[in-house]
Image (tube, rainbow, N blue to C red):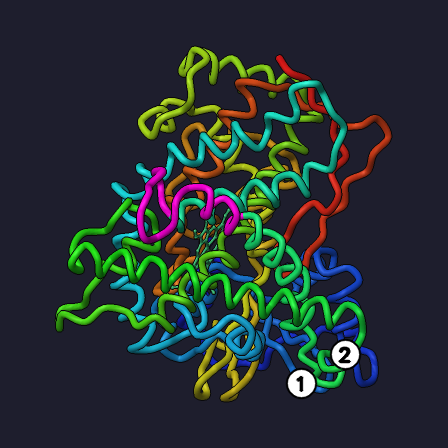
């Protein structure tokens, strides 16, 4: 660990340049073809190393302390970079894309919707969603767990946004909400699939060509914006009917509507729209990927799965999970922690320097791209003996220094995931419902390969599910 802490105060020195750059493309081809292999290979080569992405250098940060500086103390020197510029065009300027004073204000206004009390209220809807979504599994089925978890995560987040309880009234009755949910899922699936490519390769020529894929994306993108605007307008009307008081049904959107800053002002409809888009995008794929990895791991280690099932049975005794139960499932919590270590959804994060800075003693010019190597940091052999092995027992009594320096699945600093508590509840609740009712088994001979794009997910996960 001292290798890392030493680097902050070290004198300026040239960075290690990674060989193997192709003319024009640089390392971009390798980063697309074998991103995880590349990140592991270069991790040991230096605390900060230089890759070339196309004609431009990108500074890849490997060591923990510079890593923490970029995200934490040094954060005012950075914005989120060109990929986020592109994302802003596509989803609007919400908390995930904004910076500076705007970001701080939005973070303040959004915090109540993600506080402990509110997240506890979402656990009921999370359990209900998992139960309803898996009703069709009753007869036993073979399916792609990647896809199932995507749909389940999206529907859970949409229902948490729309509201926890069935509620008649101006904001629409529950049937309207269910219809909205279905429409949003359809549009969001297409947008999520397209947004990653557009953010990684922001080429106008490619995006504007009238290909069937682009036309589908544009249609879904327009539909999603329209649906979210309608959700905001409906909930605003209901809020007015309540005389502008309270947070309605306690759904995320109503809580955001009720939030006001110290000067008494809240969010405009446009800002609410952009925040709902942000939550849908930031929450869906990350949670879905983690759940799919979890099912993949449990489907291949039936002893571990049985132990998780026993724990769930003892705590729940057949009923639906409640918020308080989530603290009584230590084995499941360790399994989730280890999954987030080996497969962090945010495997590589980007930043852009706003001025010339030094990162770990390496001078970095203004407007340079900086990449944070989460994937390899989480597999550092100094912090995790036998780092590629899935071992939930690592988390029985973890070293606080390892947690601080080598475990950041939700990031850190001013942009740390605002949905961390929500994500933990969603993942634990969903898994508790699934494990209490079903056993999952990998389809013999099936091979699951990590897909590292906008998030790190397991792609197609063929699985058989049997009712218990
Ligand atoms: C396993 C699930 C999740 C993981 C691993 C994850 C990870 C992260 C990470 C690493 C960041 C920091 C990004 C950066 O610094 O650039 C982040 C930000 C964010 N996440 Fe999550 N996330 C997850 C689930 C969720 C959920 C469920 C929600 C909402 C319901 C959410 C909402 C957000 C938002 C709004 C931000 C932007 C925060 C800001 O910039 O201030 N995330 N997430």
Residues marked 2 and 1 touching at CB (< 8 Å) = yes
Q: Residue at x 24, y 58 (%)?
A: 239
Q: Residue at x 68, y 42 (%)?
A: 146
Furthest toward the left, the residue is: 263
Where the C terminus falls, by quadrant?
Answer: top right
State which region is magenta.
163-181
| Above or below, comparing residue 211 to residue 320 in the picture | below
Disc 1 marks which residue? 56
Q: Position of residue 11 (x, y in %)?
A: 46, 78
Instruction: Tell me the element at label 1.
Output: strand
Q: Position of residue 385 (x, y in %)?
A: 58, 38
* Residue 423 occupies quadrant: top left
Q: Residue at x 51, y 83 (%)?
A: 363
* Residue 305 occupies quadrant: top right
Disc 2 marks which residue? 26
| Above or below, comparing residue 151 to residue 366 in the picture | above
In reply to whether residue 291 is colored magenta, the answer given is: no
Q: Residue at x 65, y 69 (%)?
A: 219
Residue 146 seen from this side = yes
> On residue 227, which mark appears?
none
Q: Is residue 18 left or right of residue 413?
A: right
Residue 69 seen from this side = no
């Amino acid at each position: 660990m001292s290798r890392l802490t030493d680097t902050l105060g070290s004198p300026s020195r040239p960075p290690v340049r990674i060989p193997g750059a192709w003319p024009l493309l640089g390392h971009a081809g390798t980063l697309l073809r074998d991103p995880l292999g590349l990140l592991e290979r270069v991790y040991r080569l230096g605390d900060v190393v230089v890759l070339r992405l196309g004609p431009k250098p990108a500074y890849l940060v490997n060591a923990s302390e510079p890593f923490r500086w970029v995200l934490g103390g040094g954060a005012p020197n950075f914005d989120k970079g060109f990929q986020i510029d592109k994302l802003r065009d596509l989803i609007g300027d919400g908390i995930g894309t904004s910076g500076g004073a705007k970001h701080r204000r939005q973070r303040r206004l959004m915090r109540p919707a993600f506080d402990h009390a509110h997240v506890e209220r979402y656990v009921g809807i999370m359990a209900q969603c998992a139960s309803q979504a898996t009703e069709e599994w009753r007869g036993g089925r073979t399916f792609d767990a990647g896809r199932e978890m995507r749909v389940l995560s999206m529907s859970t987040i949409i229902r948490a946004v729309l509201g926890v309880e069935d509620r008649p009234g101006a904001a629409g009755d529950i049937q309207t909400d269910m219809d909205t949910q279905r429409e949003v899922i359809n549009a969001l699936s297409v947008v999520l699939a397209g947004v990653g490519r557009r953010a990684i390769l922001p080429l106008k020529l490619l995006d504007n060509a009238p290909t069937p894929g682009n036309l589908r994306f544009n249609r879904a993108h327009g539909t999603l914006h329209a649906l979210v605007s309608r959700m905001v307008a409906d909930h605003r009307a209901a809020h007015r009917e309540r005389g502008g008081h309270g947070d309605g049904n306690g759904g995320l959107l109503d809580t955001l509507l009720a939030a006001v800053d110290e000067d008494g002002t809240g969010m405009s409809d446009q800002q609410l729209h952009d925040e709902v888009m942000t939550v849908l995008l930031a929450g869906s794929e990350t949670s879905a990927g983690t759940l799919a990895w979890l099912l993949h791991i449990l489907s291949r280690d039936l002893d571990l799965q049985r132990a998780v099932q026993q724990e769930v049975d003892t705590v729940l005794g057949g009923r639906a999970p409640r918020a308080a139960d989530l603290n009584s499932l230590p084995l499941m919590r360790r399994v989730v922690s280890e999954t987030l270590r080996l497969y962090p959804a945010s495997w590589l994060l980007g930043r852009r320097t706003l001025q010339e800075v030094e990162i770990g003693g390496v001078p970095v010019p203004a407007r340079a791209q900086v990449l944070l190597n989460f994937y390899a940091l989480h597999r550092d052999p100094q912090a995790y003996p036998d780092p590629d092995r899935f071992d939930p027992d690592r988390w029985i009594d973890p070293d606080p220094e390892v947690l601080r320096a080598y475990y950041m699945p939700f990031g850190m600093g001013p942009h740390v995931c605002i949905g961390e508590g929500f994500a933990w509840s969603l993942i634990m609740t969903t898994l508790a419902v699934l494990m209490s009712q079903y056993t999952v088994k990998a389809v013999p001979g099936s091979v699951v390969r990590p897909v590292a794009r906008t998030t790190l997910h397991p792609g197609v996960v063929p699985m058989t599910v049997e009712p218990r």
